[in-house]
Image (tube, grey):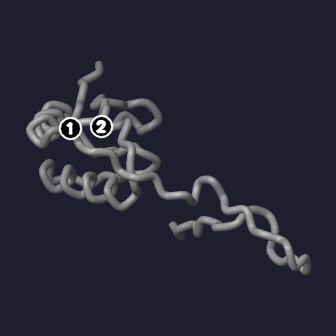
Amino acid sequence: MAKQKKQRFEGIVFSTDADFSYQEAEEYIETETIPNEKQKLKVLLDRKARKGKTVTIVEGFVGSDEDLQALAKILKQKCGVGGSAKEGEILIQGDFKQKIFDYLKINGYGVKMHG
């Protein structure tokens, strides 16, 4: 699947108006990552819309996409499985709720277990 390039500017491609200023797309603005202890993460399991396969979801991450990807990489390595991360949510293939919860707790994240 090809990666989709995010547009930096909304709507206008070119303007002949000398005083025109581009409006940047809101989704393009990078969010600053808050410290681990101020994160309010939720760890839960999900089977819906996944062909009966279980995934562990970590949601509520506030920060840059690079930091989200880095945390997801660490969690995938700790569990020895694949997964993905986007829009403040990390999906880990399989039931690793307790293992992920323990790792996040030890590393100072504010974390709760649901379900």
Label of residue 39 in the image: 2
Q: Position of residue 60 (x, y in %)?
A: 38, 36
- Label 1 and label 2: CA atoms lie apart by 6 Å
Q: Residue at 20% across / 37% down in the picture?
A: 109
Q: Tell me the quarter of the image containing the C terminus.
A: top left
Q: Please tell me how crowded label 2 is: few (under 14), some (14-19), or many (20+) other residues with Cα within 10 Å.
A: some
- In this orientation, which residue lies closer to the viewer: 109 or 101? 109
Give percent across and percent down for residue 91: 34, 44
For residue 92, what is the image quadrant?
Answer: top left
Residue 2 rendering spot, x and y as whole percentages: 53, 70
Q: Secondary structure under badge 1? A: loop
User: Residue at (31%, 38%) from the top-left corner?
Assistant: 58
Residue type highlighted by circle 2: Gln
Residue 48 at x, y percent in the picture: 43, 30
Instruction: Give the mark, 1 or 2, whose residue is nearer the N terminus.
Output: 2
Q: Quadrant of residue 104?
A: top left
Amino acid type, callout 1: Tyr
Marks 2 and 1: in contact by CB < 8 Å? Answer: yes
Extreme front residue here? 19
Q: Nearer the viewer, residue 47 or 106?
A: 106
Which residue in the protein does label 1 denote?
109
